[in-house]
């Protein structure tokens, strides 16, 4: 790849890291750049957060209700197995392109978060729950003292995985749906006009956003874990 | 108040653990004595409402209990004060003095994970004694305690047991010679 980039005219097909970095520096001061970053982040991270909340809620309901767990098992298995491109094309029929990345990133986040939270809840220490029952500990304190410390490590590993997935799937949804003023639209334009420095610069932006949001979110989770039960 | 059990039977997987037990538990300490695996814990769990009897009746047990379980059942990542706050909602005013009598320090910031087995056992007992309750179920509360700590714990149990039934499951009746004993084992 480095050889291809170093070849005279090779930058057209494969930009060098320096070209990509320079292009990124050019993009940084423009309002359109930050608008694209803001729009994509809002939808993709929004989809992540909404999906996390829904997955945690449904896992809490499923933990004590085997029939509900069985009911959710097939759709969760389908979402896990079906290629994201199929969902994107199907979702385009029903949704406008602006909502697409929110929906698709949420869809990708749901299975790992739901399954991990469910597993954490199912492994909750039954002896501590008995203690809570005998001492008549209210639900809020049970959740904060028993369930949260038990589930957080499972949720943390799922969220770490899901954050990477949601950015990949969300960007793919934007490239296919082409909502105006998003990173996906910029990636598509770069591809059409063979602007490989742009392509690499935007890819680097996605990587940085994904890593940044992961650090931020996991930092909050760790803070919560430190306070759980106290 | 008194707790009365009549004709109590409980079995697990076809193996009878309690057979036709009839007993009355009045205010003060009542020892439940039996060799290991002969129904002490089962009886306490039935009284606490954690299990249902196969047959027989329990009267007077639908009250507010505090308990020391067979295991300490502490939140291992929290210090002593955090454990009391979790179980009781707040740290009672008398907690510091009671813990001090048990040789424990309420202000110790270390999580109980790093405490010795005996210290955890005493904290589990302190939690039960500090909890508002109408009856106490203590399942082998002296496990892992030396003679001196056992005597301290027993003294506090006696004080707390005034006016409410205290069921003390143990295989060692030392210091409890004056308490009524319900013998289990062998049906």
Image: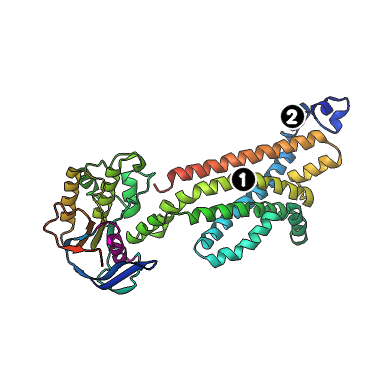
Which residue occupies the foreground of this view, B165 or A19? B165
Tell me if residue A163 comes above or below residue B25 in the rendering.
above
Residue A157, position as x, y percentages in the image? 56, 45
Q: Which of marks 2 and 1 is in front?
A: 1
Question: In this rendering, would B31 be left or right of A132?
Answer: left
Which residue occupies the foreground of this view, B29 or A107? B29
For the point 68% across and 44% down, the residue is: A38
Q: Which mark is residue A21?
A: 2
For the point 31% across and 45% down, the residue is: B80
Q: Earlier in the sequence, mark 2 or mark 1?
A: 2
Q: What element carries label 2?
A: helix
**Magenta stretch holds residue B113:** no
Residue A94, position as x, y percentages in the image? 75, 62
Question: In this rendering, would A218 be left or right of B113?
Answer: right
Mark 1 highlights which residue?
Answer: A161
Label 1 neighbourhood size at 10 Å, few (<14), some (14-19), many (20+)? Answer: some
* Render colour scheme: rainbow
Residue A208, position as x, y percentages in the image? 66, 37
Tell me if residue B146 comes above or below residue B71 in the rendering.
above
Label 2 neighbourhood size at 10 Å, few (<14), some (14-19), many (20+)? Answer: some
For the point 68% across and 57% down, the residue is: A79
Residue A136, position as x, y percentages in the image? 34, 61
Where the N terminus of chain A falls, by quadrant?
A: top right
Region in magenta: B35-49
Which residue occupies the foreground of this view, B130 or A33? B130
């Amino acid at each position: 790849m480095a050889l291809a980039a170093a070849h005279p005219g090779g930058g057209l097909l494969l930009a060098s890291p320096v070209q990509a970095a320079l292009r990124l520096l050019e993009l940084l001061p423009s309002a359109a750049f930050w608008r694209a970053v803001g729009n994509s982040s809002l939808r993709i991270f929004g989809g992540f957060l909404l999906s996390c909340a829904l997955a945690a809620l449904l896992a809490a309901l499923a933990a004590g209700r085997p029939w509900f767990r069985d009911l959710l098992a097939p759709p969760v298995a389908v979402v896990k197995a079906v290629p994201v491109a199929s969902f994107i094309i199907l979702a385009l029929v029903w949704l406008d392109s602006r909502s697409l990345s929110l929906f698709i990133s949420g869809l990708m986040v749901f299975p790992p978060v739901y399954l991990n939270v469910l597993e954490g809840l199912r492994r909750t220490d039954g002896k501590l729950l008995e203690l809570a029952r005998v001492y008549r500990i209210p639900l809020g304190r049970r959740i904060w003292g028993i369930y949260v410390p038990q589930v957080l490590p499972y949720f943390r590993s799922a969220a770490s995985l899901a954050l990477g997935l949601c950015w990949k799937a969300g960007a793919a949804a934007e490239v296919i749906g082409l909502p105006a003023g998003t990173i996906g639209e910029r990636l598509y334009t770069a591809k059409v006009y063979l602007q490989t420095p742009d392509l690499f610069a935007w890819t680097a932006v996605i990587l940085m956003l994904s890593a940044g949001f992961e650090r931020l979110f996991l930092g909050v989770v760790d803070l919560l874990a430190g306070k759980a039960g106290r | 108040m008194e707790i009365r059990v009549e004709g109590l039977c409980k079995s697990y997987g076809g193996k009878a653990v309690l057979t036709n037990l009839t007993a009355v538990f009045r205010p003060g300490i009542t020892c439940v004595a039996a060799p290991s695996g002969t129904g002490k814990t089962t009886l306490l769990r039935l009284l606490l409402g954690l299990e249902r009897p196969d047959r027989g009746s329990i009267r007077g047990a639908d009250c507010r209990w505090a308990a020391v379980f067979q295991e300490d059942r502490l939140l291992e990542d929290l210090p002593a004060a955090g454990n009391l706050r979790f179980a009781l909602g707040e740290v009672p005013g008398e907690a510091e003095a009671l813990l001090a009598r048990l040789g424990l320090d309420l202000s110790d910031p270390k999580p109980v994970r790093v405490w010795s087995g005996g210290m955890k056992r005493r904290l589990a007992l302190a939690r039960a004694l500090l909890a508002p309750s109408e009856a106490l179920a203590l399942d082998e509360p002296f496990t892992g305690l030396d003679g001196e700590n056992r005597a301290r714990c027993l003294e506090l149990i006696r004080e707390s047991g005034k006016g409410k039934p205290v069921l003390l499951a143990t295989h060692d009746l030392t210091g409890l010679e004056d308490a009524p004993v319900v013998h289990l084992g062998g049906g």
